Structure formats: structure tokens, C-alpha cells
Amino acid sequence: MREYDKDFKEEAIKLSCEIGPTAAAEKLGIPVTTLYTWRNNAKRYGEIAFVGSGHKRVDPKTAEIRAMEKKIKELEAANDILKRALGFFAGSQKK
């Protein structure tokens, strides 16, 4: 089974819009059913249609939310460490 990169798929879709799917598939040497699948994926998913094998298709907004949640957890952990350090040093000054 051949693998095609994102740029090739996008160019194939553009060509199929210009000259038709059957003619484009013949010109590029790919099955017309493959080209139809690419066109459907591009229509359905837009910019995230061709993410590559083994990668999850994640909406950019979802990815941003996940990154922010991760940053919040890191900051909360750092804040907890600072609170413990403040308690430690405050306790040592009372003696």
C-alpha cells in the first residue's frame, strides 16, 4: 500500500476540482476511490484532514484547552511547593 504526503493529497484534491475526479486520478495514477476518500476527508475535517498515520485528529481549540489545562496543573504544583517552603521557613524563624 502506497503512502502519500499531505501536500500530494491537497494538490490531488485541487486538480480533481479543476478537471474532475476520474481524470485527476488517472493523471496521478491513483485509484479514483482513494481520491474520493481524500475529498470527503478534506470536506469533513478541513485543515486537520491529513494529520498522518498514527496521529490523532485534534481540533486546534481542543489542543489549546489541553495545553492550558496542563499549564494550570504545573502552576498549581509549583504553587504548592512554594506554600510548603514558606511554611517551612516561617516555622524555622519562630524558634
Image (spheres, helix red, strand yellow):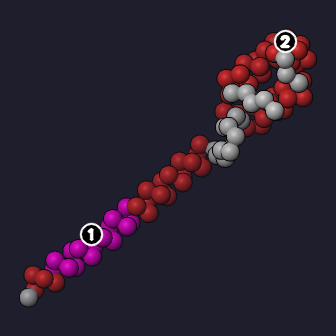
Residue in front for this viewpoint, 88 or 30: 30
Residue plotted at (71% across, 35% down)? 49
Q: Estimate the x, y position of residue 80 in percent, counting from the top left.
A: 33, 71
Relative to the observer, which residue lies in front, 43 or 34?
34
Identified at 49% across, 58% down, the residue is 69
Horizontal side, residue 39 vs residue 88: left or right: right
- Which quadrant of the rendered structure holds the N terminus? top right
| Above/below status of 90 relative to 39 | below
Q: Residue 18 appears at what percent x and percent y?
A: 81, 12
- Sequence-first tag of 2 and 1: 2
Distance between the Cα atoms at labels 2 and 1?
Answer: 64 Å
Q: What residue is at 68 percent from the left and 45 percent from the top?
A: 54
Q: Is residue 49 left or right of residue 38?
A: left
The amino acid type, in three-letter code, at marker 2 is Lys
Instruction: Indicate the amino acid at tag 1.
Output: Leu
Q: Which mark is residue 57?
A: none
Direction from residue 62 to residue 70 in the image, left or right: left
Q: Is residue 54 magenta?
A: no
Q: Residues within 10 Å of mark 1 (few under 14, many from 20)?
A: few
Camera-side mark, 2 or 1: 2
Image quadrant assignment for residue 74: bottom left
Q: Which residues are magenta?
A: 75-90
Residue 88 in sight: yes
Q: Quadrant of residue 14?
A: top right
Residue 82, numbered label: 1
In the picture of the structure, the residue carrying the numbered disc 2 is 27
Residue 17 drawn above or below residue 90: above
Q: SS for tag 2?
A: helix
Front-most of residues 8 and 86 = 8
